[in-house]
Image (cartoon, rainbow, N blue to C red):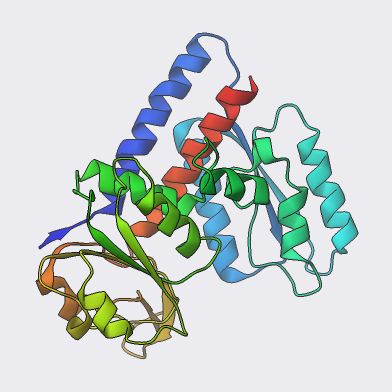
Amino acid sequence: MQILDGQVVSQATKDELKMKVGQLTAAGKKVPHLAAVLVGSNGASETYVGSKVKTCEEIGYKSTLLRLPEDISEFKLLQAIEDLNNDPDVDGILVQLPLPKHISEAKVIETIDPSKDVDGFHPMSAGKLVQGLPTFVSATPHGIMLMLEHYKIDTKGKHAVVIGRSNIVGRPMSILLSANTNPGNCTVTVCHSQTKNLKEICLQADIIVAALGRPEFVTADMVKEGAVVIDVGITRVADTTKKRGYSIKGDVDFQNVSPKCSYITPVPGGVGPMTIAALMANTYRACMERN
């Protein structure tokens, strides 16, 4: 069993981007500029956005963090996004989800200029992905593909099972794994809350991507010997033995599943760091395409 270490792959990706930014700076060219929009003060969102801003500094990107109140109107939020769309210095825009209930996430995503959609959530980005056209790919699936590539995991002709069908992870992941690329060329089964015989389907899988948001859902009796397991889940579970009062759990029962795997991602330290690395790669690409 080998650990797929997201910290290592993420650092390699960031080091490469830092070198490229150094070359841009030396040539007197524009460096990438990422603008993040944070509505309200959700603790998890604060952490995520903070790490994205910190990573921008580490690589040498310019970053802007736009903090907006929880009760901002949808109209004013859309206006703020339009201002970023129209700012020629901004290359990438991300609006941290989830948003307050009175704001339509769909409207917000559709308002972002597709050429600055570094999260890869815009319907135009999603449509291009389906058609196999160059586009921004949602950062978590993109990060997983970078990890598979880094570890030279053979995916050609393999049976991949994706548990979860969200537009952020499950759907784009299934498209990427089935694409005529390397990594890719898998036969993909997408499972979800209504799937019957989930255990039997998972036992056929050479690769399992668990992205359903239920802690330790994938158990050892669902995984065949030698499978590759990618755990996208990250849930806070109450834990009185911890000083902070909670533990971070993935969607996979790591302790019992890992001995059966050829490769597995830990939680934390697996997919999470890759998501931010992929976002940074998307932002660099946006800058190159715009300038």
* 109 in relation to 252, above or below: above
Residue occupying the point 36% across, 29% down: 16
Residue occupying the point 38% across, 46% down: 179
Residue 271 in view here? yes
Place of residue 163 in the rendered image (x, y in percent of width and height, measured from the top left): 39, 72
Residue occupying the point 43% across, 22% down: 20
**Nearest the eye: 265 or 123:** 123
**Nearest the eye: 74 or 67:** 74
Residue occupying the point 64% across, 24% down: 290
**Quadrant in which the C terminus is drawn:** top right
- Apparent side of residue 38 relative to residue 9 in the rendered image (left or right): right
* 26 in relation to 205, above or below: above
Place of residue 177 in the rendered image (x, y in percent of width and height, measured from the top left): 36, 53
Farthest residue, direction bottom: 240
* 210 in relation to 265, above or below: below
Place of residue 125 in the rendered image (x, y in percent of width and height, measured from the top left): 61, 45
**Quadrant in which the N terminus is drawn:** bottom left
Farthest residue, direction top: 27
- Apparent side of residue 141 relative to residue 28 in the rendered image (left or right): left
Place of residue 113 in the rendered image (x, y in percent of width and height, measured from the top left): 73, 40
- Apparent side of residue 134 relative to residue 186 in the rendered image (left or right): right
> How many numbered marks, from 0 up?
0
Residue 245 in view here? no
- Apparent side of residue 214 relative to residue 289 in the rendered image (left or right): left
